[in-house]
């Protein structure tokens, strides 16, 4: 049983981990209650970019706080009751915006993203999906010309991490994206960026590659895990169970609730987000060539196979709280000023949740239970960083040197999740 692994969760992170552990010669079973890539890894904006190194909790957040208190900002809304119930997480999230912690996070995310982009290219090629990858960058757009402290910080971090960018004036924006109306005073083209036209399909393609290579998949809902002398038993909602030497928890936003059953408290909060697809211009004129982020209006528009996908900023709220569509309505109004959106294509908005730990770094490594591994907490960048996470996790599980420093991602950085001596 020692060579057997159960990977719980078949989002981008779980599927990438399953492929990597399979490559290492382990007997891998991938478990999900739904089809692979149906949840958060389906609904995202499909951007894979070197520029995702600056998390929401950066030193400029402190200055922005008074503006966020109104709870009307397009980029961040919150449920006050949820924040009060999670005040410990909120405090730690704000403290992680201090320059020292922030700079360590930037350096760690930069390493993880570089590794991930490399691994994505390999996996896209191996799964026959390279045609899905657009490599023409992504764009930040600003309606006002003066730079804010947040923009200055962003550009400084890009310079430090050698992220290739190009400043754009209105004429340059028009040349790159002719369908946009001339409402933007400035832009920033991130050259070291890619995007895909259907994130869920990419995950399904990776899961098919795993199956073609002999990987086993189960469509079952896990309800608990139990330590055995030789490994772990995972129990399912249908009453069945599976034994494995080791278990990887890659349940995205559901990871924290699941691990509570094993007596582990994971400091995770939910940055919820919504999306809606639009048909674009009635005359069928091409809309966008690449994803754009209208920074002050707080939305992202991505050209997808289904249409233009409008995705929203952050709503801090409980995972299962009822949807609130005000942010999406506001984003739609703002996006319609920038581009002809056309009619809505979905019956109702999609809702998902970015799973976020207080320092905005994912958790990758062994939990304080031998043979139980963490691969979750990827906030805004899990679609892009799943494969890098898998590479790090695979090396740690095999006892090999990791391709990047794993320490910034270790569960042990949080109280109650380490050190190794506390394992049971
Ligand atoms: C609006 C929005 C836009 C985003 N844009 C981007 C972007 O452009 N680029 C980027 O890199 N990231 C983006 N993200 C973030 C990214 O989508 C997530 O970080 C990532 O998808 C998390 O992947 P995951 O595999 O950890 O989780 P998920 O994809 O949620 O996978 C978890 C899986 O676990 C399964 N599961 C849950 N509970 C159980 C159970 N009990 N038993 C069995 N299975 C279970 C679920 O069915 C699911 O398939 C965005 C997120 C949002 C919300």
Image (tube, rainbow, N blue to C red):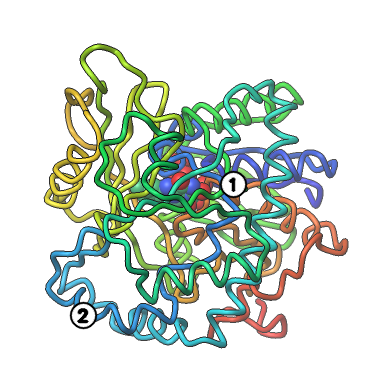
Question: Is there any visible trace of residue 228 in the rendered image?
Answer: no
Residue 346 % position (x, y): 22, 26
Please indicate whether residue 54 sits to the left or right of residue 346 in the image: right
Task: Locate residue 310, reporting x and y percent.
Answer: 29, 39
Nearer to us of marks 2 and 1 is 1
Mark 2, ligand 1, within 8 Å: the answer is no
In the rendered image, the residue lying farthest to the front is 171
Residue 263 on image: x %, y %: 48, 72
Instruction: Specify the label residue 389 is tagged with.
Output: none
Residue at the farthest top position: 283
* Residue in front for this viewpoint, 255 or 90: 90
Query: Residue 33 versus residue 412: which sits nearer the camera?
Result: 412
- Element class at badge 1: loop
The residue at the point 30 percent across, 49 percent down is 184
Q: Name the residue under label 2.
A: 84
- Counting from the top left corner in percent of width and height, residue 80 is at 15, 73
Q: Confirm whether residue 45 shows in the render.
A: yes
Mark 2 packing: few (<14 Cα in 10 Å), some, or many (20+)? few
On the image, numbered disc 1 is attached to which residue?
191
| Label total for image | 2
Q: Is residue 72 above or below residue 190?
A: below
């Amino acid at each position: 049983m020692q060579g057997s692994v159960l990977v719980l969760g078949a989002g981008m992170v779980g599927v990438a981990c399953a492929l990597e552990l399979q490559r290492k010669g382990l007997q891998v079973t991938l478990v999900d209650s739904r089809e692979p890539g149906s949840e958060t890894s389906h609904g995202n904006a499909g951007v894979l970019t070197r520029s995702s190194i600056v998390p929401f909790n950066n030193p400029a957040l402190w200055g922005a706080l008074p503006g966020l208190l109104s709870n009307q900002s397009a980029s961040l809304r919150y449920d006050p009751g949820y924040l009060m119930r999670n005040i410990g997480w909120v405090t730690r999230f704000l403290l992680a915006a201090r320059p020292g912690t922030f700079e360590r996070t930037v350096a760690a995310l930069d390493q993880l993203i570089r590794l991930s982009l490399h691994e994505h290219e390999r996996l896209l090629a191996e799964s026959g999906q390279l045609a899905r990858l657009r490599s023409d960058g992504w764009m930040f757009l600003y309606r006002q010309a003066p730079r804010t402290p947040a923009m200055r910080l962003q550009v400084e971090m890009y310079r430090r991490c050698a992220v290739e960018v190009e400043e754009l004036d209105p004429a340059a924006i028009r040349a790159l994206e002719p369908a946009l109306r001339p409402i933007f005073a400035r832009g920033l083209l991130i050259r070291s960026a890619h995007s895909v036209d259907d994130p869920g399909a990419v995950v399904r393609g990776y899961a098919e590659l795993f199956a073609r290579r002999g990987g086993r998949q189960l469509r079952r809902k896990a309800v608990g895990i139990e330590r055995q002398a030789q490994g772990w038993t995972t129990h399912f909602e249908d009453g069945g169970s599976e034994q494995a030497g080791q278990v990887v928890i890659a349940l995205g936003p559901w990871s924290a609730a699941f691990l509570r059953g094993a007596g582990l408290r994971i400091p995770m909060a939910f940055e919820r987000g919504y999306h809606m697809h639009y048909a674009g211009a009635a005359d069928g004129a091409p809309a966008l060539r690449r994803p754009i982020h209208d920074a002050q209006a707080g939305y992202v528009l991505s050209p997808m196979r289904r249409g233009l996908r409008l995705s929203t900023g952050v709503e801090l709220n409980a995972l299962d709280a009822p949807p609130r569509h005000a942010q999406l309505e506001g984003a739609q109004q703002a996006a319609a000023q920038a581009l002809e959106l056309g009619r809505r294509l979905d019956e109702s908005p999609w809702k998902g949740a970015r799973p976020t730990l207080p320092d905005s770094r994912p958790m990758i490594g062994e939990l304080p239970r031998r043979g139980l591994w963490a691969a979750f907490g990827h906030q805004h960048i899990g679609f892009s960083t799943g494969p890098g996470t898998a590479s790090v996790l695979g090396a740690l599980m095999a006892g090999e040197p990791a391709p990047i420093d794993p320490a910034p991602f270790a569960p042990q950085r949080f109280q109650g999740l380490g050190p190794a001596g506390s394992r049971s």
